[in-house]
């Protein structure tokens, strides 16, 4: 087993290059099922969620080629299986995009119920509502979601009860080859939604309005192959911006779309960071005190829920008391107990956390409860006095490419260390 060992107290200086967006990649890869020809995808992040998805695509019969570190080619023209393997599906939540793409192309899909980070209940009722509106029969049994549309799929007007990234994307995927024009109202507007729509259009689809709350999908007979480059990861970039705001220093974050970061950098500036925006990079520095702030997480362009653990960590050593309200997930505060081990003063009541700034955090052994909670533990290790060891790094490496190497490049004292897992301990007894 591996964990991270981080000696805190070092400021961050230098440059970091952001990888392709995880939440775009994990939707675009399944979306290739809709395409009757080779899709060349560039700027794919080297993360385990992508690896898991590529294994699933191969199991379905897709021809998957790794062109280089960040470029893949997927050809689904010969796919015939519409049943995704249960054991692989459970690993990641985004596997549910295979339902929309298999249903959209073959009018049939059998996909295991999704796994993914545990923030309490993670329903898929809006996805099901969309598929049924398009004419599919949906059953959930034996741990699988069974969808079928013997008479094909017909366009519909779908009004989402909840602003849902997953449901918006899944309904887009299911409707690109359907008869007529589908309208998705109350759609999510995240940058990765726009990226999926742009990918589909580059393959011959007709999707309009992505990035607004009304998306119109006019069905086309078929999608042909093509090539596409994934946008930079807004949350990875935000995580490095939060890290330097917490630790202090001065870094240049390269390969970003500054507009996508505004919802994050605006809050970091309130906290005392100095932000300079360039065409495809953002400079973030902090050498004064960290100011207390209030945060409410909301769908884009609100403050992203996937950035809340990282900022709470920085606020643990701010001047004053901050209030965080989680407006998207039921319970995203499991990481708070880990911060308390390090001396943080945080009270959680339902969706609200009150963070009382303390003079310092102290290093401790902590766990990564989920992907962004893991990133928060790394940031806590960067600012704590002493050594912090972060276990369960498998979660972190699902979504952060080369995080140890990138932080080391910025001057952090972080390394991967081996430690015996329970199996090895038992064998040694
Ligand atoms: C995506 O999850 C992201 N994951 C999450 O990022 C992110 O936190 C979330 O969007 C919100 O931005 C991927 O893109 C793979 P939702 P998703 O459907 O699509 C409720 C990360 O760290 N809801 O937008 O699963 C739901 O309970 C991950 O990268 C329903 O009620 O989120 C939640 O309260 C963690 N019914 C809200 O909507 C549904 O059918 C938003 O969920 C679907 C969702």
Image (tube, rainbow, N blue to C red):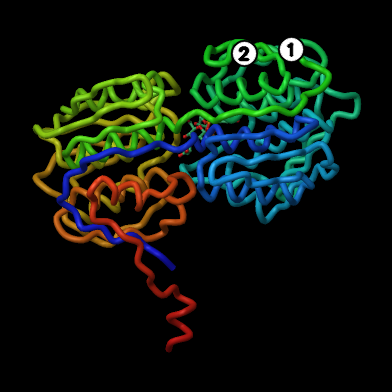
Spot the residue most to the front. 68
For the point 38% across and 70% down, which residue is it?
418
Answer left or right for 77 relative to 376.
Answer: right
Compared to 232, does 212 lie above or below? above
Answer left or right for 69 relative to 143.
Answer: left
Res 226 quadrant in image? top right
Q: Circle 2: is it few (<14), some (14-19), or many (20+) Cα within 10 Å?
A: many
Mark 1: which secondary structure?
strand
Compared to 163, does 12 lie above or below? below
Asked whether the residues under the numbered discs 2 and 1 touch, taking CB atoms below 8 Å apart as contact, a structural biologist would say: no
In the rendered picture of this protein, how many numbered marks are placed on residues?
Answer: 2
Q: Circle 1: is it few (<14), some (14-19), or many (20+) Cα within 10 Å?
A: many
Residue 157 screen position, x and y as percent: 70, 12
Compared to 236, does 205 lie above or below? above
- For marks 2 and 1, give the CA distance: 10 Å
Mark 2: which secondary structure?
strand
Give the quarter of the figure containing the C terminus. bottom left
Spot the residue most to the bottom. 429
For the point 64% across and 42% down, which residue is it?
95
Label disc, if present, on residue 159 of the rendered structure:
none
Answer left or right for 160 relative to 415.
Answer: right
Residue 245 screen position, x and y as percent: 21, 35
Residue at the disc numbered 1: 218
Residue 385 screen position, x and y as percent: 14, 55
- The CB of the residue at mark 2 lies under 8 Å from ligand 1: no
Res 155 quadrant in image? top right
Compared to 297, does 75 lie above or below? below
- The CB of the residue at mark 1 lies under 8 Å from ligand 1: no
Give the quarter of the figure containing the N terminus. bottom left
Residue at the disc numbered 2: 215
For the point 65% across and 29% down, which residue is it?
227
Which is more toward the observer, 13 or 123? 13
């Amino acid at each position: 087993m591996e964990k991270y060992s981080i000696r805190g107290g070092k400021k961050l200086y230098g440059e970091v290059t952001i990888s392709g967006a995880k939440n775009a990649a994990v939707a675009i890869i399944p979306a290739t099922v809709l395409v009757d020809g080779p899709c060349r995808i560039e700027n794919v992040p080297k993360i385990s969620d992508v690896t898991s998805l590529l294994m699933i695509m191969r199991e379905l019969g897709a021809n998957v080629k790794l062109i280089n570190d960040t470029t893949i080619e997927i050809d689904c023209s010969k796919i015939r299986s519409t049943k995704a393997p249960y054991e692989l599906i459970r690993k990641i939540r985004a596997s549910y995009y295979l339902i929309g793409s298999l249903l959209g192309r073959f009018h049939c899909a059998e996909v295991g119920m999704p796994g993914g980070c545990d923030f309490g209940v993670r329903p898929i009722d809006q996805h099901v509502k969309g598929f049924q509106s398009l004419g599919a029969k949906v059953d959930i049994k034996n741990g699988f979601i069974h969808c079928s549309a013997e008479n094909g799929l017909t366009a519909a007007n779908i009004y989402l009860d909840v602003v849902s990234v997953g449901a918006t994307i899944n309904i887009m995927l299911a409707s690109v080859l359907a008869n007529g024009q589908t309208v998705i109202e109350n759609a999510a507007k995240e940058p990765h939604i726009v990226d999926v729509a742009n990918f589909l259009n580059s393959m011959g689809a007709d999707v309009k309005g992505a990035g607004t709350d009304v998306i119109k999908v006019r069905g086309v007979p078929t999608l042909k192959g093509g090539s596409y480059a994934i946008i930079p990861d807004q949350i990875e970039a935000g995580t490095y911006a939060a890290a330097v705001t917490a630790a202090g220093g001065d870094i240049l974050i390269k390969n970003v779309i500054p507009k996508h970061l505004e919802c994050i950098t605006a809050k970091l500036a309130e906290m005392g960071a100095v932000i300079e925006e360039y065409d495809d990079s953002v400079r973030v520095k902090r050498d004064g005190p960290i100011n207390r702030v209030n945060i409410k997480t909301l769908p884009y362009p609100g403050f992203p829920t996937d950035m809340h653990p990282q900022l709470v960590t920085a606020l643990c050593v701010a001047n004053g008391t901050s209030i965080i309200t989680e407006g998207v997930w039921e319970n995203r505060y499991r990481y708070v107990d880990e911060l308390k081990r390090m001396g943080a003063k945080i009270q959680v009541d339902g969706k609200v956390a009150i963070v009382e700034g303390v003079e310092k955090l102290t290093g401790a052994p902590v766990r990564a409860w989920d992907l962004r909670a893991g990133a928060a533990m790394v940031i806590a290790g960067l600012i704590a006095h002493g050594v912090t060891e972060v276990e369960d790094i498998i979660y972190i490496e699902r979504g952060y490419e080369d995080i140890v190497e990138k932080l080391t490049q910025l001057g952090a004292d972080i390394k991967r260390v081996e430690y015996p897992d329970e199996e090895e301990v038992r064998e040694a007894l």
